Amino acid sequence: MTDKKVLTKDNSPTFHSSEYDETYHSTSGALEEANKKYSDVVGIEKYDSVSVLDLCFGLGYNTAAALDKFTGSRMTVVGLESYQGIVDEIINLCDSGEYPFQCEYAMEHVAREGRYSDKTVSVELKMGDARETIKELKDSSFDVVFHDPFSPQKCPELWTEEFFKEVYRVMKKGGKLATYSCARVVRDNLKAAGFEVTDTKPVGRRAPGTMGVKK
């Protein structure tokens, strides 16, 4: 089975995963989610230099939203993704003119080559199980983490205390983790891993998202 394209309510496309039986983004708006639950939450435009870890890179929307809003001198991004099929859809969306971000050239290059760089931006995509690829990353490397797996019910292995401890390890002191989930188990595991946890504004639903800060 292949993933099916879905048009969300803000007219940006996403896909429905046949493996996880979930969409990659909220159907209330994929573009809105990338902006308001991730890049806006961490205040990406306030950084002059920033390093980003994009967990579950998928269609690259969270990274793309950050690239479009970044006005500083240098941004480096490392994306972790396990499924090549969804990365290939970046190319298809760019070719059809449906990719909903201005930085589509950079994102298509990442999808085709696994990396992109210019004088301001560097993006590298690492394929494989995030529980293993994260172990290749150095301690205290990232200012920002976009944590965007499928839901805790569908993909519990990427919401555990053990995994969050690895995320905590690779973050700089004061680093910010943004995620859409506010589930009790998620917040308990974040706290157990050492994060200070707060609400973020609701987007497309009544429940808030979550911010984790490395103390």
Image (cartoon, rainbow, N blue to C red):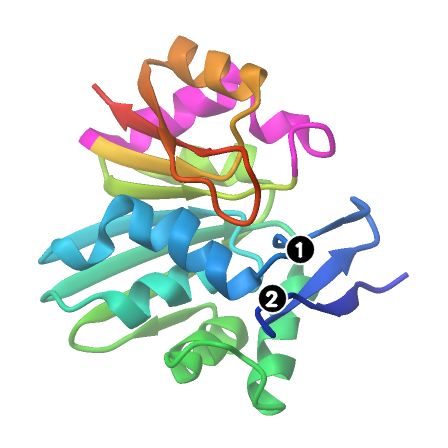
In the rendered image of this protein, does residue 94 appear above or below residue 212? below
Q: How many numbered discs, if any?
A: 2
Q: Residues within 10 Å of mark 2 (few under 14, many from 20)?
A: many
* Quarter-of-image position of residue 131: top right
Report whether 68 appears left or right of 15.
left
Front residue of 205 and 114: 205
Q: Secondary structure at mark 2?
A: helix
The reply to whether dot 1 and dot 2 touch (C-beta < 8 Å) is yes
Give the residue type that dot 2 points to: Val
Residue at which label 1 appears = 83
Dot 1: element? loop
Left or right: where does residue 74 sit relative to residue 29?
Answer: left
Looking at the image, is 54 positioned above or below residue 74? above
> What is the distance, in whole Å, between disc 1 and disc 2 at their CAs?
7 Å
Please state which of residues 138 and 83 is positioned toward the viewer in this rendering: 83
Return the residue nearer the eye: 72 or 100: 100
At which x and y percent is residue 162? 50, 17
Q: Is residue 196 left or right of residue 206?
A: left
Instruction: In the rendered structure, find residue 87 and report the number of the disc placed on it.
Output: 2
Residue lying furthest top: 192
Position in image of residue 75 (x %, y %): 21, 61
Look at the image and say whether residue 203 sits in the magenta stretch.
no
Q: Residue at x 26, y 67 (%)?
A: 69
Q: Amino acid at mark 1?
A: Tyr
Residues shaded magenta? 151-174
Identify which residue is drawn at 67% across, 55% down.
Answer: 83
Residue 73's x, y, as percent? 9, 66
